[in-house]
Image: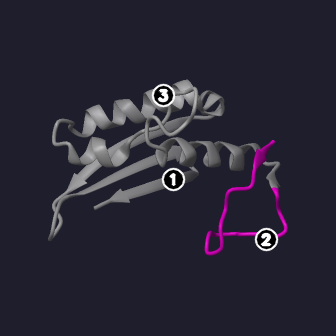
């Protein structure tokens, strides 16, 4: 059982829920937690989290390297990711003010978690 992490405005938000029972919803919640946590923010797990802004804007990492970091985080901290076919892709686009990073995580070719960093 995982805590219900959807907020007002999220698709299918239900204000009456306190926990998530669906395994797929748990997987998506765990993926979002890993993606949006910076390293050092979780007490006792200093390596937990993707540090996405640092990875994207440090100018030291290319698409493949960022993809590898995300995959390693999922492998290490999201046990449900091994039960499903989870595919990660990272793409960069030229933006008007600064470049944009697109991180897509596809689950069983049906569900997708997408992050745009600009």
Mark sitting earlier along the chain (1/2): 2
Q: In which quarter of the image is residue 108?
A: top right
Is residue 4 rendered magenta in the image? yes
Closer to us: mark 1 or mark 2?
A: 2
Query: Which numbered circle lies on residue 46?
Result: 3
In the picture, the quarter occupied by the N terminus is top right
Q: In which quarter of the image is the C terminus?
A: bottom left
Q: Nearer the viewer, mark 3 or mark 2?
A: 3
Q: Which of marks 3 and 2 is nearer the N terminus?
A: 2
Which segment did they paint magenta? Answer: 1-18
Residue 2 point in image, percent of width and height: 76, 44
CA–CA distance between discs 3 and 2?
A: 32 Å
Report the Cα–Cα distance between label 3 and label 1.
Answer: 24 Å
The location of residue 12, given as percent across then percent down, is 70, 69
Query: Label 2 belongs to which residue?
Result: 15
Query: Of the residues under marks 3 and 1, which one precedes in the sequence?
Result: 3
Q: Is residue 16 above or below residue 53?
A: below
Q: Residue at x 42, y 56 (%)?
A: 115
Mark 3: few/some/many CA within 10 Å (<14, 14-19, 20+): few
């Amino acid at each position: 059982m995982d805590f219900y992490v959807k907020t007002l405005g999220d698709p299918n938000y239900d204000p009456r829920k306190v926990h998530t029972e669906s395994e797929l919803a748990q997987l998506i919640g765990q993926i979002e937690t890993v993606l949006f946590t910076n390293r050092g923010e979780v007490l006792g797990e200093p390596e937990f989290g993707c540090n996405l802004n640092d990875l994207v804007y440090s100018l030291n990492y290319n698409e493949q390297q960022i993809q590898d970091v995300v995959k390693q985080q999922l492998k290490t901290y999201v046990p449900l990711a091994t039960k499903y076919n989870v595919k990660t892709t990272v793409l960069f686009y030229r933006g008007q003010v600064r470049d944009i990073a697109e991180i897509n995580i596809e689950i069983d070719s049906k569900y997708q978690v997408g992050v745009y960093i600009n």
